[in-house]
Image (cartoon, grey):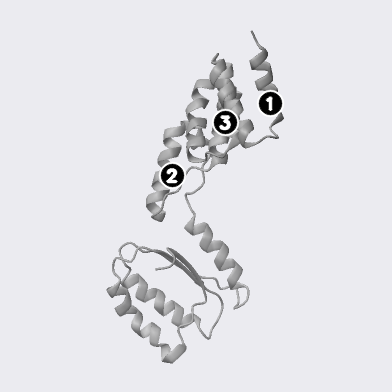
Amino acid sequence: DMFSAYITATPWFLYGGKALLKESEALLKKHAKLRKFYYFFVGNEPEIQDAVIEFNEKLKAHTPKSLKWSFHHLKSENHITIVPRSISAGLLQLYSGWEVTPELMAKGLKDVQGHFRILSRKYDYKVNVPANILNRMGFLALRGEKFKEALPIYHYCVKLYPGYWIGYHNIGYCYENTGDKQKAIQYYQKSLDIHPKNKRAAEKLKELKNAK
């Protein structure tokens, strides 16, 4: 139960006269509600591949209800080269559907939040929208001078990542461009407090405070 996902290259079923292979059917039935991800691979390995293929057949016949899994016989690989191929292919399968496409971002914040709620249910832990995704969405809105559209994106960003100084800076920029001088000063100052080397925020604060 330590991990929720496993990637196995050339699983060895030959110990103890194939004891694990013989017990696998009973174990699969015992854990019929197993909620895990499992991806296993074997190469061109005559000594062990038959036992792995046999396990694959047992798993197909007795797949636990919530187990997400796949098996791949990579005949072009050997016992050495199978390892990096297994890790790469396993991770690609595990994280399929993770990507946030430009099309999804264009739909707006609610759709992106919904995407990550689906991922959270899939992996059985909270997956937050990454700060760089939110910043990219906000920047696209800023580039189109859609400041009111960018504001909730950046507010959500700093709610998730309260130390993200870029988010506070861009909130200040939005308020500056929508005529709310006091809030612009507030958020530029917050950005500068977190990141004192933010020269642009310092310049903006000086400019706003000196403005009549």
Residue at horizontal 59 percent and vertical 67 percent from the top: 85
Say whether disc 1 or disc 3 marks the residue closer to the N-terminus.
3
Residue at horizontal 68 percent and vertical 17 percent from the top: 207
Residue toward you, 37 or 61? 37
> Residue 119 location in percent, x, y?
42, 49
Residue toward you, 166 or 190? 190
Q: Which mark is residue 81?
A: none
Residue 167 visible within the image: yes
Give the labeled residue for mark 1: 202
> Residue 40 location in percent, x, y?
48, 70
Total of numbered circles in the picture? 3
Give the labeled residue for mark 3: 168
Q: Is residue 199 above or below residue 115?
A: above
- Circle 1 — which element? helix
Q: Alpha-carbon distance for marks 2 and 3?
A: 23 Å
Label 1: few (<14), some (14–19) or many (≥20) C-alpha neighbours in 10 Å: some
- Circle 3 — which element? helix
- Circle 2 — which element? helix
Q: Which mark is residue 116?
A: 2
